[in-house]
Image (tube, rainbow, N blue to C red):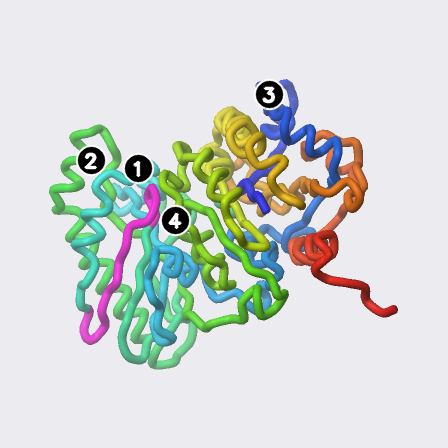
Amino acid sequence: MLIMDGLGDRPYKLLRNKTPLEAARKPNLNKMAHNGETGLMYTLGPGIIPGSDTAHLSLFGYDPVEYYQGRGVYEALGAGIKLKKSDVAFRVNFATIKHNKIVDRRAGRDGCCLDDLAKQIDGMKIGDTRVIFKHTVEHRAVLVLRGKGLSKDVTDTDPHETGVPPKKPKAINKTNSARKTEKVLNSFISKANKLLDGSKENKKRIRRGLLPANTLLIRGAGQYNEIPSLKELFGISASAIAGGALYKGVAKAVGMDVLDVPGATGDKNTNLKNKAEYAINSKSDLVFLHVKATDSFSHDGDYKGKKQFIEKVDKEIISRVLNEFDLMFVSGDHSTFASIGEHTAAPVPILIYGDKKLVRPDLGMFGERRAALGQHRIIGLDVLPILLSKAGIVGKYGE
Ligand code: ZN
Ligand code: ZN
């Protein structure tokens, strides 16, 4: 299962009215599409704009309505933090603020010095609550509040726009735990802001011409409960190859073995060749291979960069893995339109390739609009059952 994050897009004039995927030179993906099944996937259902977390749960066969635990939980698991049931975990952006207004929600997407800053924040005490804080990839970080009587029922501080101040975290209900968490978060934010503002790391960033990472935007509160594994639910073993913490975390939550691949960073310079080698060498029934940069390019409005990255995936992953697996599924977790820099509800093209006796080819090429001529119209939750039946792991329903 190869997922290019935020793969789906719309046509752009400068790409000769093609989408980045349509415009990309991708002989290997086209070869697969020509001999494979294609179609469109509304990952969470028509009209629902997927987050990456809920989208991946569906792709793994887990209905997010039942299993979703908040983005913070997956980021924390993916960052290697051992969560307790009473912990509250959040996803954090290092961000840039000037005169209390947000200038950049991602501090220029540059991870410089953020490891060191995170180490200074990690271990803070707010009353009887302990702060666990870890920098992951680019501007991203994880916050875990550990202590008595905390709750995930607090609002986000990230307004998802620039030119406005960050929001204040607020208790969603009147329980003592929600109120306490609101208080703890507020003190944490002012303490962290002071530390960031006066830090030598930010002076270094400014000297290097980077935006200072002088505030934290906090979102996606969640509390962790173990859920049944892929082995328990579907009887399959699975391993995961991803750079981003979120994807490692969702994979861990469903019981995948998360492989540590050298150079798999989850950014635009990630080592795709290593990812392909590790996928081929995995002995698991299912290998999940995730690439993130397609989505990041779109969030930054860079549809040309997205097109070039798809070409790189074709050359460095697809060409290598093409004849190594019995069955392959290639798609995105959702569309991200570079035109608006955000996820949209537009369906993503899917591609199923494998044993000629089991695959009924659509004679397509791999692209959003060609996929509309393909045989499939599915949602994310359909993916695993389709793969399991083609792989002969699930048999007939009835006689
Ligand atoms: Zn995504
Ligand atoms: Zn995204």
The answer to the question of whether label 2 and label 1 lie on touching residues, with beta carbons closer than 8 A, is yes
Q: How far across and down, in percent of the image, does residue 329 sit?
A: 64, 44
Q: Which mark is residue 260?
A: 4
Of discs 4 and 2, which sits in the foreground? 4
- Residue type at mark 1? Asp
The alpha-carbon separation of the residues under discs 4 and 2 comes to 29 Å
- Residue 117 makes an appearance in the image: yes
Q: Which residue is identified by label 1?
A: 110
For marks 3 and 4, the one nearer the N-term is 3
Residue nearest the observer in this picture, 323 or 17: 323
Instruction: Tell me which numbered mark, 4 or 2, is placed earlier along the sequence.
Output: 2
Per the rendering, the mark at residue 15 is: 3
Rounded to the nearest angstrom, the CA distance separating label 3 from label 1 is: 28 Å
| Residue at mark 3 to residue at mark 4: CA–CA distance | 36 Å
Numbered disc in front, either 1 or 4: 4
Left or right placement of residue 20 versus residue 172 in this view: right
Q: Secondary structure at mark 4?
A: loop
10 Å crowding of disc 1: few (<14), some (14-19), many (20+):
some
Which mark is drawn over residue 269? none
Magenta stretch: dominant secondary structure = strand
3D distance between C-alphas at marks 1 and 4: 22 Å
Q: Which residue is mark 2?
A: 205
Q: Indicate which disc, 1 or 4, sits on the residue closer to the N terminus.
A: 1
Badge 2 density bin: few <14, some 14–19, many ≥20, Cα 10 Å: some
Quarter assignment of residue 58: bottom right
Q: Secondary structure at mark 2?
A: helix
**How far apart are the two marked residues, 2 and 1, measured between alpha carbons?**
9 Å
Q: Secondary structure at mark 3?
A: helix
Q: Position of residue 322 (x, y in %)?
A: 62, 35
Q: Quadrant of the C terminus?
A: bottom right
